[in-house]
Amino acid sequence: VKVKDWEKRLGGVSTTIRLLRFLKAKYPKTVFSLALGSDAYAERHLWKDFAGIEKIVRLIVFPRGAKSPIPNVSSTAIRALQARKRLQ
């Protein structure tokens, strides 16, 4: 896994659709997938141009909660922990 700063380099407001359009233009032959928890998928109506996202990527939706094969970790909690560490 390589971490890239493409969202930062794009500048402005960061949205998933904006990043995906950039990536598709940069790598037109690549088939992209987007993994989401079922909780994020349930809120897809709040995302900017989710219909456009679905045209660019293959969606992989994972269950969340007790029946999930993935640890029940919130990205919000992770960001809060990172922020606290930066303040120390």
Image (cartoon, rainbow, N blue to C red):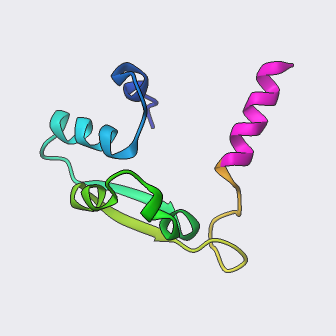
Image quarter of the C terminus? top right
Horizontal side of residue 66 vs 61, given as left or right: right
- What secondary structure is the magenta-colored segment mainly? helix
Residue at 20% x, 42% y is: 24
Total number of numbered discs in the rendering: 0
Residue 29 pos. (x, y %): 12, 46
Residue at 34% x, 24% y is: 10
**Segment colored magenta:** 76-88
Residue 36 pos. (x, y %): 49, 61
Residue at 19% x, 47% y is: 30
Vertical comparison of 53 with 6: above or below = below
Image quarter of the N terminus? top left
Residue at 46% x, 69% y is: 61
Residue 5 pos. (x, y %): 43, 24
Vertical comparison of 35 with 25: above or below = below
Q: Residue furthest left?
A: 29
Residue 82 pos. (x, y %): 73, 32
Q: Residue furthest right?
A: 88
Residue 58: which quarter of the image?
Answer: bottom left
Residue 70: which quarter of the image?
Answer: bottom right
Residue 83 falls within the magenta-colored stretch: yes
Residue 13 falls within the magenta-colored stretch: no
Vertical comparison of 6 with 30: above or below = above
